[in-house]
Image: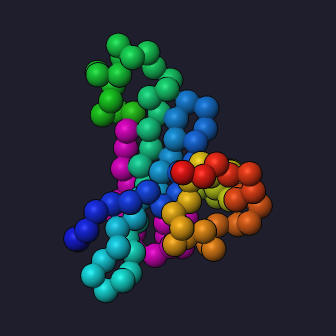
Amino acid sequence: MTGTWEEILVLRFEGGRVTLMGQKQPDGQWVFLKETNESAFFDEEDEDNLNALLQTKSPVVHSWEEATKLLGKDWERKRPAYVHPEFEELVPKQSLRRRPRR
């Protein structure tokens, strides 16, 4: 795979966040993976020891449908903290209301 990973969709929740990352391929298609970070559950002094356990990455998937499955069945009900401009049309409209802009 080539290119850099970009944030596609960020879902924040109490205690952490889930980020759908994407990488645009030379043929224009995107591949995706999910990153989770649950470090807010621990004190800063715990962070060094637990960092690897609290931050995880999924396997790479090759379609938007597979990517949204990584987010779980209720992801559409959560209001995203960020949506990549190229993917706003794929996120349910009710999720985008009152969403902070970056």
Could one spot residue 102 in this view of the protein? yes
- The reply to whether residue 70 is visible in this rendering is no
Question: Foreground residue, 50 or 82?
Answer: 82
Q: Residue at x 25, y 68 (%)?
A: 3
Q: Residue at x 52, y 35 (%)?
A: 16
Please check the rendered image and state whether residue 22 is part of the magenta-colored stretch, yes or no: no
Q: Percent position (x, y) of residue 92?
A: 70, 66
Which image quadrant for residue 2?
Answer: bottom left
User: Residue at point 64% right, 48% down?
Assistant: 100
The percent coordinates of residue 52 (x first, y second) are 30, 34
Q: Is residue 74 above or below residue 65?
A: above
Location of residue 25 in the rendering, given as x and y in whole percent from the top left corner? 30, 77
Q: Farthest bottom residue?
A: 27
From which residue to which does the magenta span run?
55-68
Left or right of 59? Residue 96 is: right
In the displayed structure image, the side of residue 40 where residue 27 appears, left or right: left
Describe the colour scheme in one phrase.
Answer: rainbow
Please determine whether, in this image, residue 43 is positioned above or below residue 98.
above
Magenta region includes residue 57: yes
* Residue under the point 63% across and 74% down: 89
Residue projecting furthest to the left: 2
Camera-side residue of 72 and 84? 84
